[in-house]
Image (cartoon, rainbow, N blue to C red):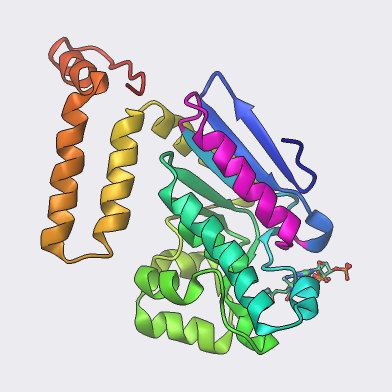
Amino acid sequence: MEYTAILVEREDAENIATITVNRPDKLNALNSTVLRELGAAFDELKADETVRAIIMTGAGQKAFIAGADIAELNAIPDPIHGAYHAHLGQELCFKIERLRQPVIMAINGYALGGGLELAMAGDIRIAAETARLGQPEINLGIIPGFGGTQRLPRLIGKGLAKLMIYTGDQVTAQEGLRIGLVDRVVPLALLNEEARKVAINLAKKAPLALAAAKAAINQGLEVDIDRGCDLEAAQFGLLFSTSDKVEGTKAFLEKRQANFTGH
Ligand code: COA
């Protein structure tokens, strides 16, 4: 598929790919085209067995994604279309969350509204020191609609999530690190390198085991611990059908590096 508002780059030698939202003049705001193209790009990469880890970032030095496109929000005529718009963003977040590959969010600047909601659907968030994160929808007379009211309290707790959503205030990358909203903070100049380093490291791991860990953690958090441990045992057991389990254990015993194929 030809993309007009995003870039999709594969690094075949490293088995990684990078998706860049490419509307820097609008701080990479999410219009319907971006949302649809992102959905198509994640589908395309999901189907590509050579891609084992994905980085998502924003073009330019200023913004990861400054939220849903406010001009589009302004033009939504009625509640039905408002709900459609929320579903479009929510489905994209679920797609990222349920992707078999890990998704590293390289937050290179503003991650606001839908930008923070997409970032929270990813697996690992690495932020530039200059990044600012927030859910400012309240200042537009609305609330987060791409899952923010659900994922933010799950990540940072109910009280802090309410504080961020009720006030619309932004937090710095360092504050984000302290409250668990981001996982690592680096200088902006080192962000791409750091995200690539993490992606390349993950791309060397057994892909089916990574997918199993992702599913067990994400699904397990939504159920009680007994059910969560059942999910874990089922995923653990499934991996005993894979060649990579044979290779991983054999390589350890032979004191050599494992070569995982994803089978
Ligand atoms: N939707 C549509 N356009 C947006 C946008 C958004 N979410 N965020 C930024 N833009 C556009 C601006 O309208 C401006 O376009 P223009 O040059 O054609 O006027 C351009 O991006 C640059 O933004 P600007 O506001 O001039 O940059 P700034 O450095 O002064 O401020 C922000 C940066 C992020 C603080 C400010 O752009 C902002 O508050 N954006 C909206 C954030 C938001 O509410 N997001 C949640 C939406 S639900």
In the visual, does 61 lie left or right of 155? Answer: right
Residue that extends furthest to the front in the rendered view of this protein: 80
Instruction: Judge whether 177 appears above or below 150 on screen.
Output: above
Q: Position of residue 198 (x, y in %)?
A: 45, 38
Nearest to the observer: residue 168 or residue 244? 244
Residue 50 seen in the current view: yes
**Disc count in the image?**
0
Nearest to the observer: residue 129 or residue 79? 79
Q: Is residue 42 magenta?
A: yes
Q: Residue at x 78, y 71 (%)?
A: 72
Q: Residue at x 33, y 20 (%)?
A: 260
Q: Position of residue 259 (x, y in %)?
A: 32, 15
Q: Position of residue 119 (x, y in %)?
A: 53, 58
Q: Residue at x 75, y 51 (%)?
A: 60
Q: Position of residue 131 (x, y in %)?
A: 61, 62
Region of the chain picked out in magenta, as a range:
27-52
Q: Quadrant of ligand 1?
A: bottom right
In the visual, does 1 lie left or right of 197? Answer: right
Nearest to the observer: residue 198 or residue 54? 54
Instruction: Judge whether 73 appears above or below 21 on screen.
Output: below
Toward which corner of the image does residue 18 lie, by quadrant?
A: top right
**Which quarter of the rendering shows the N terminus?**
top right
In the visual, does 137 lie left or right of 244? Answer: right
Residue 193 seen in the current view: no
Toward which corner of the image does residue 81 lie, by quadrant?
A: bottom right
Residue that extends furthest to the top in the rendered view of this protein: 254
**Which quarter of the rendering shows the C terminus?**
top left
